[in-house]
Amino acid sequence: MNKIEHIGIAVKDLDASNKLFAALLGTSHYKTEEVTSEGVKTSFFKAGPNKIELLEATNQESPIAKFITKKGEGVHHIAFAVDDIESEIERLQKEGFVVLNAVPKKGADNKLVAFLHPKSTSGVLIELCQEIVP
Ligand code: ZN
């Protein structure tokens, strides 16, 4: 795995949190994107070399809606950049990690993504993401 690509934060109200994080980081979000398949609306911030992804549920079936019901707003996942997501999934499965989607799917920000179940990673939802090269 490479660097931390971004940290994902579940929020109840994206507009309100966009304002809050703009004030916190001293810069506005640079993009928003809806991922219909995941039932989320996202926005991205840059803080130096780091990225923050805010996620708001767009329906009650969304994993973000379920997360907020259970735990409230807060850090939802840590995403690591990988060069080859398929081989990384295979490696992690061999190590005994529970991969939630063994077939990578299209996530926000032009990435192929896969998630590791928090029960196999000390309670932290881990996202693997590989940039889609056009
Ligand atoms: Zn993410």
Image: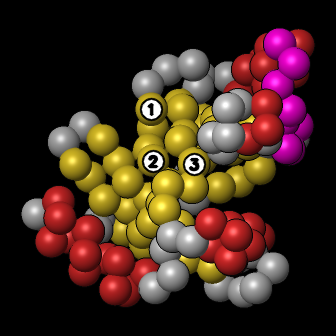
Q: Residue at x 57, y 19 (%)?
A: 1
Q: How far apart are marks 1 and 3 (CA)?
A: 11 Å
Is there CB contact under 8 Å for labels 1 and 3? no
Q: Distance between the residues labelled 1 and 2?
A: 8 Å
Q: Name the residue under label 3.
A: 77
Q: Distance between the residues labelled 3 and 2?
A: 6 Å
Q: Residue at x 49, y 55 (%)?
A: 75
Q: Mark 2 points at which residue?
A: 7
**Where residue 4 is drawn, which disc sits there?**
1
Is there CB contact under 8 Å for labels 1 and 2? yes
Prevailing secondary structure of the magenta residues: loop
Q: Does the magenta stretch include residue 129?
A: no
Q: Residue at x 26, y 52 (%)?
A: 46
Disc 3, SS: strand
Residue 102, percent across and down? 88, 37
Q: Is residue 98 magenta?
A: yes
Residue 87, percent across and down? 78, 18
Q: How crowded is mark 1: few (under 14 residues within 10 Å), some or many (20 or more)?
A: some
